[in-house]
Image: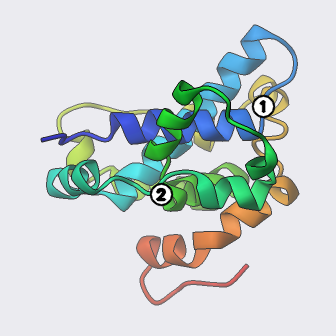
């Protein structure tokens, strides 16, 4: 039984980086991917905080990218290769939405990283999410589309209230 979230994290990161690509070459693409992966990892760990949660999503599946593709307009594109479709089944809409929130709101990102610090995913291993919570100028340039609040707004709005509730129960603010 799958008890880790790596397929979900990889697929959701890939969806974000394909939907909001970096411009500026290989280094920019790598920096954008690192930022997306950090945001998706934090979001996934918040969404599935225990090994039981991870195992359940591994068995049931996260739902796929169809809804996200429709929102971003990517559903019109034909996915001609079977391989292009297979990874999309591991995309988690809630995790993508939460990651979009974290990428566009520094305060939410800091709260989320603090919330996972005591979770089971980080047990015994120091984990740093610097590129998510404290991006430098090069990080911001590389991820200009990935961190653009207006571009990510439709995705972030899907589950923002649930993320705010998760980070501070009873204190969700509709943004």
Looking at the rendering, which quadrant does residue 155 occupy?
Answer: bottom right
Distance between mark 2 and mark 1 Cα atoms: 24 Å
Q: Position of residue 87 (x, y in %)?
A: 49, 34
Tag shown at residue 21: 1
Q: Position of residue 61 (x, y in %)?
A: 34, 53
How is the rendered protein coloured? rainbow
Q: Residue at x 75, y 9 (%)?
A: 26
The mark closer to the camera, 2 or 1, is 1
Q: Position of residue 42 (x, y in %)?
A: 45, 47
The reply to whether residue 30 is in sight is: yes
Q: Position of residue 95 (x, y in %)?
A: 50, 55
Nearer to the camera, 46 or 9: 9
The reply to whether the C-beta atoms of the residues labelled 2 and 1 are less than 8 Å apart is: no
The reply to whether residue 38 is in sight is: no
Q: Is residue 38 above or below residue 152?
A: above
In the rendered image, the quadrant that contains the C terminus is bottom right
Say few, some or many: other residues with alpha carbon within 10 Å of mark 1 (under 14 / 14 to 19 / 20 or more).
Answer: some
Between discs 2 and 1, the one toward the N terminus:
1
SS for dot 1: loop
Looking at the rendering, which quadrant does residue 25 occupy?
Answer: top right
Say few, some or many: other residues with alpha carbon within 10 Å of mark 2 (under 14 / 14 to 19 / 20 or more).
Answer: many
Q: Residue furthest bottom?
A: 170
Q: Which residue is mark 2?
A: 112
Tag shown at residue 34: none
Q: Is residue 106 above or below residue 136?
A: below
Q: Residue at x 72, y 19 (%)?
A: 29
Q: Residue at x 24, y 31 (%)?
A: 125
Instruction: Give left or right: position of 35 versus 73.
Output: left
SS for dot 2: helix
């Amino acid at each position: 039984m799958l008890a880790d979230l790596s397929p979900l994290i990889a697929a959701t990161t890939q969806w974000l980086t394909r939907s909001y690509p970096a411009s500026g070459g290989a280094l920019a693409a790598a920096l954008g991917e690192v930022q997306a992966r950090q945001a998706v990892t934090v979001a996934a760990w918040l969404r599935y905080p225990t090994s039981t949660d991870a195992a359940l999503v591994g068995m049931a599946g996260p739902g796929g990218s169809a809804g996200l593709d429709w929102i971003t307009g990517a559903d019109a594109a034909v996915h001609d290769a079977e391989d292009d479709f297979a990874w999309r089944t591991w995309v988690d809409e809630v995790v993508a939405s939460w990651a979009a929130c974290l990428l566009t709101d520094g305060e939410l990102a800091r709260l989320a990283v603090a919330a996972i610090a005591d979770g089971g995913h980080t047990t015994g291993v120091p984990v740093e999410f610097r590129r998510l919570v404290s991006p430098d100028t090069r990080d911001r340039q590389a991820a200009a589309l990935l961190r653009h609040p207006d571009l990510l707004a439709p995705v972030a709005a899907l589950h923002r209230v649930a993320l705010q509730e998760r980070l501070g129960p009873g204190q969700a603010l509709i943004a």
